[in-house]
Every structure is written in structure tokens, then in C-alpha cells.
Image (tube, helix red, strand yellow):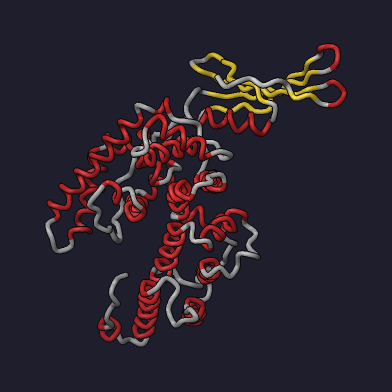
Amino acid sequence: MAASREPRPLSGGRSYSFEILLQSQGRWIIDCLMDREADAVQRARALLAQGRGEAVKVVRHRSGPGGTEVKREVLHERRAAAKDAAFRIPAEPDAAPVCESLAELRGLAGRMTLATLFRRSLVEQRITPSELLYDWRYLRRLHDDNRVLAAAIHKVAAKQAGDGSVAQRRACLEALVEEGIRRTRDLHGHKSKLPILQDSDVEAASGIIVERFGTEAHDEVFLLAVCERLAPLPNLSAKLDMLLRLIAGAGERALETLLEGPLADCLGFPEVVSEIFPESRRLADFLDHLIDFLKGNSLAATTSPQLKAIGYLMEAGRAPSCRFVLLDRLQRELAGPAPLDANEPKNEARCLETLRRALKLGDGGWLGGDATRTALESRRRRLRQEDLRRMGLDSTADSLRAPAKH
């Protein structure tokens, strides 16, 4: 139990204190008293996120002259029910960079591949790829469905193998996946030793992890603590908000870097991005906003606090994964089949030219490099093919050579 505090005296002989109660196995237990409501609410929710009980309450006690006391409940929350939806058969990945170690499998490229494979399942369960990798509650569900897991491994192995042996790549991936499963399962057995991760003092939690688990295990244990903090939140947007708060309280750059990974995961979901970017009637308008943001042109005018915080992190070079994920979204949309202006197909070429000019940098290069140029060429080629087919020149359209994939 945390140390109690004396009630905070106020003028007129009144004082306030905030009692935190934790429900465990159906019984309510007093955790501690605190003198600030905001601190009490934050601690209560952190206890809930850690799985210390089924529910929490914060009760305000107001003491007055003559021993009078008034109680009022200011918080009563229950732990979110386990999201036990099954994982769906994985989608076909567009690309799957080769990974030779567990660190690479858990890295940004590996998590982006996971997001492609299981996007529908992740959205339904409202979890990020990082949570799937580090939280045994979710990884066990995937592990127990041999059919889905085997299909995912095979699809990635086939993409990675190219002209080589799919069987060899599959065997390598199976070994890495089993190693990751074993480590996540082992960590799950020590969850009771995890510190409560509070956004006001992330460094303190990091120090406790080093004391209890050692320096070598720090990073993966810290990420498990992050997953525990995210678990009770209702949706991916709320998780993005929490990660930004944790980053703001991280202090150390190394902790910021660890937290930026799950933050980038959140930005890989179109549903999250559409909530923080200005509403756009056309794909061309959204891409224009995204280009401005990636170039740092619109930060001052940005009204979304989340977008502004991410923008300043990117501008300072402290969110490279977020930048990579948003550039990947830009390039995929440029190369994709969705019309830039669904209501006015005749505007397609004009919209593409406007975007092309916006993507050109002052030094003659492209925002996002050659991958962006290739994506532009892919869309331009498709437009040219459509024009030729309208003129009845199908064979000429078919003969246009597709650019190399980025």
C-alpha cells in the first residue's frame, strides 16, 4: 500500500483528502490517501492498467469544523473486459523485409508487416502491433490458433524468399517467432513486479525496472509496462494520447525512443490518422495536408494538439519512426488505385500535378526520396493507360512498362 498523506488543510478549517480504493476478488481495499484529486485519479487508473484489481474508486473526503465530513465518489472505473476476438486469416503483405533476429522482428519494419497481416484483427481488438508482440494476453491468442499463425509465417516467408527457398525462410521465421513467444510468456509470469507507469515520472518506473529485472532486460520489460498502461484504454486514439503524455514525461532520450515505437504503430492505422488530420473531402486534399505536415509547413497553424506534438517531435528529429510511417502512407496512397478526386475524375491529372510540385524539394530531390518518385510514376502511368484505353488503344496501354516497386 502506498504511504498515506495528511488531509490538505484549507481556509475555514476545512480539508480535503482523496481515498483510493481497489477491488480485488470482490473486496474493496484501501490503497492510499492523496491530497490532490488529479494525482489520485492518475494512480487509480494506473493500478487498473496494471491489473492489480477488477475496479477502482476515488472518494473525496471533505472535513469541516466540528468533525463533520462529507464524502463524494469522483471516480469509479472497472477494468476493460478482455478483448478475446479471434485473429483472422492474415492478409497478403505488399512487402516483408528480411529479419534475422528477434530485435529485427520486433523492429519497425517487422511491426509494419504485422500491421498489414492483421490490420482488421488489430482494429477489432483495438491494439497496436507492439501490444501483440509484448503482451501475452494477445500473443497467446495468436499462438493458440496454429492455422492463422502458420498462414502468417508462410505468407511472410514467401515474400521474403523471392527466388530462394521458402522452406528455409519459413524455418528461420518459425524459430524467431518461437523465441519471441517464449520471452513474452516468461515476462508475463513476472507482471506483478512491474512498476506502475505514470506519465508524470516515467524515469522513476524505468529505474525500478533496472533494479528488479536488470539492465539487459530493461527495454522489453519497459515496453511490457507500456502495454499494461495502454491495455484499459478504449481505442487506438486514446492510446496515441497516452503515449504522447508518456513521451512528454520521459525525460531521457532513450525512453522517448522506446515510447516512439508504439506511437508510430498508432499512426499506421488510417482510422487514427483521419482523426488527427483536418477533415478532407478528397484524397488529394488529405495528401496535400500530409505533405505540408511532413515538410513542417503547417505546424504553427495546426489545431490538433496530438498532431502538433508529433510534428514538433519530428522536427526535432525525435520521432523518426513516426516520420517513416507517415511517408509510407503517403507513398502507398500515391501509388494506390483510389482516385484523387472521386467526384470529378477529370481533375485527376491536375491534382497529381499539384501534388508533384508540392513533393519537389528545393534541392531538386523528392520528399521521401526515390520511393516517392516511383509512386508518382506509378499513378501517372495508370492515368496514361486509362487515357489510351478510352481511345481504344488497349495494346498500347498494356505495353507501358511498370516502374520498379519501391
Q: Quadrant of residue 141?
A: top left
Q: Position of residue 402 (x, y in %)?
A: 28, 77
- For this view, does 241 lie left or right of residue 392? right
**Residue 28 vertical placement versus 406 (above, below):** above
- For this view, does 184 lie left or right of residue 164? right
Residue at 35% across, 42% down: 133
Q: Is residue 191 visible?
A: yes
Q: Position of residue 18 (x, y in %)?
A: 68, 24
Q: Is residue 346 visible?
A: no
User: 287 or 291: which is nearer to us?
Assistant: 291
Picture quarter with the C terminus: bottom left
Which residue of the protein is positioned furthest toward the top in this rendering? Answer: 67
Q: Position of residue 118 (x, y in %)?
A: 35, 48
User: 402 or 296: which is nearer to us?
Assistant: 296
Q: Quadrant of residue 391?
A: bottom left
**Residue 96 vertical placement versus 61 (above, below):** below
